[in-house]
Amino acid sequence: MSLNTTTLPIELLQQRAREAWGLMQPCRLCPNDCLAHRHDGETGRCGIGKNVMVATAFPHKGEEECISGHKGSGTIFFSGCNLSCVFCQNMEISQRMQGTGIEPKTLAFQMLMLQDAGCHNLNLVSPTHVVPYILEALSLAVEQGFHMRVVYNTGGYDSIQTLMLLDGIVDVYMPDVKYSSPEAGEKYSGALDYPREAFEAIREMHRQVGDLQFDEDGLASRGLLVRHLILPNNLAGTREVMRFLANEISPATAVNLMGQYKPAGDAMKYAELNRQSSIEEILEARRIAEEEGLTRII
């Protein structure tokens, strides 16, 4: 059951929103468990306190083809993040808090405006730390006719209890799997437990939506689409990530091996990150994915 096929009862959306708000006082929305009293205005590890902040909301034509299509993906970039990746390309938004504070009713209006613009889906970027606001806004938007597919575009550092509140609401999960090494998670994203938490989150996402499916227009309609950024010097631990996906999720897991890495944010402070990934590294990553048994590599 999902918003694009059969509208969830408003009461259920409202109940999920209340449960999500409950996880925010003190905050346990993500694996950081920072316990900030965000209802009272205390800032969490994510940089966000009482009010949600949005950096941009627009039809995005630069996502995967099955997400953007020809009309664009209705993308909302949320300010703040529960990770602190040193190479983040959106550091002004994720860590330096560029954006505007808004109320859930304004967020609902933005959702409806993107639908009116003809976007193929609602693409929620960096949503983990603001799930309560999203659920409340969705309940308000659905009351006014919102029916787009929902894409959950996340860094992968998600808690099971929060993801369970999204069951039946999210159509397409689009998580990153950044690293297979705890050491890399700690050094480059400030999360020693990143691999464990991300792998568990992927299991829950796949349980909810299964392998990626497409509609008659070739657009993603439901399922899991994993992104893996190819870092230089194999810092992402690509083979271990691909082996996990093939053996513990599904050989048919759709995987986007992203070869566009270039130093951004604070990456130039780390010698091992201070160059683009080479063509050889990109081709090697694809070869590894095929060797591990994955059959749907984008």
Image (cartoon, helix red, strand yellow):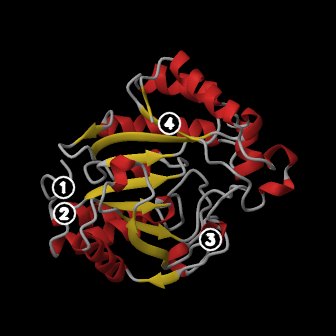
Circle 2 is placed at which residue position? Answer: 147
* Label 1 Cα neighbours within 10 Å, binned few <14 / some 14-19 / many ≥20: some
The answer to whether mark 1 and mark 3 are in CB contact below 8 A is no
Q: Report how far apart the C-alphas of labels 1 and 2 lie in the structure.
A: 5 Å
Q: Earlier in the sequence, mark 2 or mark 3?
A: 3
What's under tag 3, amino acid-wise? Gly
Is residue 234 rendered to the left or right of residue 208?
Answer: right
Disc 1 marks which residue? Answer: 4
Name the residue beneath numbered marker 4.
200
Q: Amino acid at mark 1?
A: Asn
Q: Can you tell which of label 1 and label 3 is closer to the viewer?
A: 1
Q: Amino acid at mark 4?
A: Glu
Looking at the rendered structure, the secondary structure element under dot 4 is helix
Q: Name the residue nearer the viewer: 293 or 182.
A: 293
Q: Residue at x 19, y 63 (%)?
A: 147
Which of pointers 4 and 2 lies earlier in the amino acid sequence? 2
Please identify the quarter of the rendering in which residue 220 is found. Answer: top left
- Which residue, given by chain and number where applicable, does mark 3 sit on? 47
* Residue at 51% over, 83% down: 100
Q: Nearer the viewer, residue 210 or 280?
A: 280
Which residue does the image show at 38% across and 60% down from the upper left?
123
